[in-house]
Structure formats: structure tokens, C-alpha cells
Image (cartoon, grey):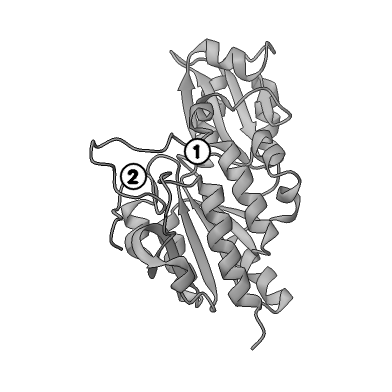
Amino acid sequence: MEGYKKNKTGAYRKKENEKGKRSAPRDYADRRAESEETASEGCIAGRNAVRELLRSGRDIDKIFVQRGEREGSIVVLVAEAIERKIPIVEVERQKLDTLCAGTHHQGIVAMAAQKEYCSVEDILAIAEERGEKPLVVIADGITDPYNLGALIRCAEGVGAHGMIIPKRRAVGLTSAVAKTSAGALEHMAVAKVANIAACIETLKQRGLWVFCAEAGGTAYDETDFDCPCAIVLGSEGEGVSKLVRDRSDVIVTIPMYGKVNSFNVSTAAAVILSEVCRQHRRKK
């Protein structure tokens, strides 16, 4: 579309002004992303506690390990986590102290999900049980818990059947996400997958059309969403990855008319998902 170009921030940004400066600030929560994994009911500290957590089979978003030489039982715990493909993050001791708010962590802290994840098939089954066209929201690498929580609330509010998030380089279902969703997380099925691009291919094989919210596409209000569909929304800083964009069927864009040249991802989701919901529920 004239006046728009693709850039790192996703589907909602105009061209930069003549001086090359953006006319909108960063997303409101960008600066919080690195500090949001704080002490909560999802923070499990200490070797024995993490060992029991692993044995329980409960979903674990990631495990933080103190940087440096590992010894004793922590080596076994890390090996088991790697075998289960749980991300391991090496950090300084001060980071672990902050995560568990002074609890004796013995060099290891696990972040457990606030809710059990489901499968992609479970999400599609929900749509089938309701007798509705599938509507799936895909969050491609969103790292800020406030954005993900708000996105979950938007998705639940329009009746989406579920959300898909990646296992790595993205926030999981932390307590901050649950709190920001204001209760919506309890009603939203969330699947966690190893590869978003591969998941898109699976959805397409199941008959879904994949719409990617990015710059340079068809205006959202001129797009036909009256079909089984998945809506892809990108991260705060990088937008939708090129591979995911290339795998999508249609690129959709929100036209911007004011001086502010971007929407927060959850705001953009509310705009696009409301239109999808309207088309899915209109009477023939």
C-alpha cells in the first residue's frame, strides 16, 4: 500500500518521516520485558524443588542456571531438562536472587507455566465441538508478558478457539501473563510448539488459511476472513519472522491515518480479530 513499507515492527507502521525518525514511541511494555520474570507462584527455586517439578511432568517454560562450572545434582537436572527440550538459560547469581526474592536457590530456578498447555489438535477440536470455523491466533515470538496477556484477552473476547506460541525466544504462560489477561487465560486453550513455520504448514493441511499481520499487505477491512483461519501477529521488536511471513497465505495490514505510526500488538490484534469475528458470525 502506498505510504507503507515493511520494517521490523510489523504490520502497523508507516514509512519514517523525512528526517528518518519514528513518530511513535516504542511499545509501552518493551522496557519491562527483561525484568518481568519475578518471584511468583510459577517460580520454583532449589535443586530438590526443581527435581520434583521435573518428575511431576508439569509444563516448564525455562530453567535458569547460575553461570559458571556446574557440579553435583545440578548437572543431572540440566541433562534431564535438555532431554525434555526445556530451554536452559545461564545467568549471574544476582539474577537468580531477584527471580526467587531471596529464597535459597542453590544455583537453579525453574519457571513453570501458570496453566497446562494443550495441543494444536485440541484447539481444532474445540472449534469442531462448537460447530464453528476454526479461528486460531499465532503469537510469533512475543517476549513481553503484558503484550501476550493482553493478546490472550483479545483472542478470548472475540471467541478464538485457541492460541499458539513458540517454545523458544518468547514468553510463556507466566504469572504476569495470567494477571494481564484479567482471567481470560483460564478460558483460552494455548499450545506451545517447537516450530511456528512447521505448525503453519500443519494448519494449512487441515484446511486453515493463514493471515499474517504485516506491512505491505491488503487492508484488513478489505480482506475475506470468512473461512477457517489462523491470524499471525509478530513480536514487539522484530515483527513476524520472514520464514513465517513467507509460509502465510495472505498479508494483511491496518491502514494508519494519524501521526502515530504504530499500534501495540494487542491493539492491532483487537482491530483485526474483531473483523474476523464479525465475518465469521454474520448471517448469510
Q: Earlier in the sequence, mark 1 or mark 2?
A: 2
Q: Quadrant of residue 41?
A: top right
Residue indicated by mark 1: 143
Task: Give the quadrant of the C terminus.
Answer: bottom right
Q: Quadrant of residue 275?
A: bottom right
Q: Secondary structure at mark 2?
A: loop
Residue found 53% across the figure and 38% down from its top: 86
Seen in the image, is 153 located left or right of residue 22? Answer: right
Q: Which mark is residue 55?
A: none
Gap in Å between the C-alphas at discs 1 and 2?
15 Å
Residue 59: where, in percent of width, then height?
64, 42
Is label 1 in contact with label 2 (beta carbons under 8 Å)? no
Residue found 39% across the figure and 69% down from its top: 250
State the residue in front, 75 or 86: 86
Residue 79: where, in percent of width, then height?
50, 31
Q: Which mark is residue 8?
A: 2
* Residue 177 seen in this snapshot: yes
Q: Amino acid at mark 1?
A: Thr
Q: Secondary structure at mark 1?
A: loop
Seen in the image, is 140 located left or right of residue 119? Answer: left
